[in-house]
Amino acid sequence: MKQVELASLGLYYHIPFCSRLCHYCDFVKTALFDGEHKSLYVDALKRRTEDWFSRWEEWDSDRKCTSVFFGGGTPSLLDQEYEPLFQTLAPHLEEGAEISLEANPEHISRPRLDIWKSLGINRLSLGVQSFQEAGLKFLTREHSPSEAAVAVSLARELIANVNIDLIYGWPGQTVSMWKDDLERALALGATHLSLYSLTYEGHTPIARRVQRGVLSPAADDALVELYELACERMARAGMIHEEVSNWALPGFQSRHNSLYWHGSNYIGIGSGSHSYLNSLGPWGQRWKQNSSWRSFAAVKPEPRRPSCLDELLGFSDYELEEDRDAEAYILETISSSLRTLRGVNLDALCKKTGYIWKPRPSVVKAFEGQLLTLDAGGQLKLRESEWFRESAWALELSLSLEKGIS
């Protein structure tokens, strides 16, 4: 059996059900379901969770999950249905584990909040997206600005940690509209804000409109202006800028999202979910779940427990990321960490890969201009104003690492 050393360990559960399909969303989702489908799906989540826990106990009987995240789709379409899953989860959670649930404002009610809280959910992420009528119409959201405000206020009464998602860069948005969105979110007492630039992904309706030439994405300069405005306003509000799109009040940083940003371990369960264990193989192992929620729900327990992780990952509904190498590991490590307050530890990266740091002229110039800094402990950081351009910087920095002579 392959031994796995786990430090922080998160669980992600994907809930694919939506009452309607938003035109900008490229995640695995469906609006064709009923109550029986929800029950079958949660039962499948429970069974697969039991399979994973049977493996973890053999690797490290004392290891607990530090965070759990319910994403989607629309996890707030379910409440009491989660109870069997939480009964399975309870013995395997670290004391004080962060348990987050994504929710739509129109689903927030006191009875529902009471159920979620009783299950152990202690963090809500509300998909407000905008407090502007025009923004909500373009993004095809079901709630109104006033309903969003009421939902945030009610959630804050019962659950201490509440994140608000907002999107900027949608057609017709003005700087004053964006300022108003930020002010409203702060006034409502959000402990965490996720501010995302609108992207035109995959086969979404808005991406198809761009391809047909009937819609144009916002210019880069306009997006930079909105991003810099957010940076300045969040700083004045005392928010910690933990990652390019995420700000938190002190003590409310996202424990789960940090796993993604800094190469820690997480297991995804549910259709379309992704997983990563950093101790599997020389460069860690990534895999993803088949995106069909119907096939996931139909998978029945094996007649015996899988005898090792390799067998578990060999289930037909998983797809392993093949041919991982040092260069891919370097680029993904720098890409994910460079856009964060913590940055990336260059010494640790060189030690693990055997590569040597030889900064390119563009990187040397960036150090001279203090766009990049490197401390005595090997921590490499990018200036906050440049996080928005992380992809270009990650490539330059990755090319500044060269294979050592063996």
Image (cartoon, rainbow, N blue to C red):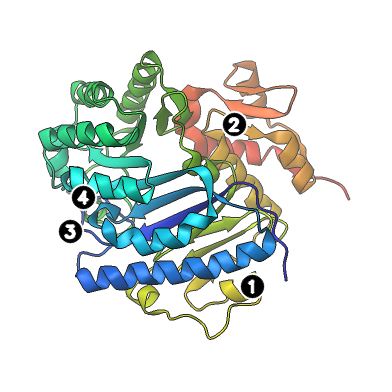
Residue 32: horizontal and vertical position, in percent? 20, 69
Q: Amino acid at mark 2?
A: Gly
Return the disc, 4 or 2, that comes first in the chain's sequence: 4
Which numbered marker is on residue 310? 1
Q: Which residue is mark 3?
A: 19
Q: Residue furthest bottom?
A: 303
Q: CA gap, disc 1 to disc 2? A: 32 Å
Separation of residues labelled 3 and 2 (CA atoms): 39 Å
Q: Find the distance from the CA under tag 1 to the CA under tag 3.
A: 37 Å
Mark 1 or mark 3, which has the lower sequence index? Answer: 3
The reply, left or right, for residue 64 in relation to residue 16 is right
* Secondary element type, mark 3: loop
Label 4 belongs to which residue? Answer: 213
The three-letter code of the residue at mark 4 reads Gly
Q: Taking 139 as reference, is 185 above or below it? A: above
Closer to us: 247 or 358: 247
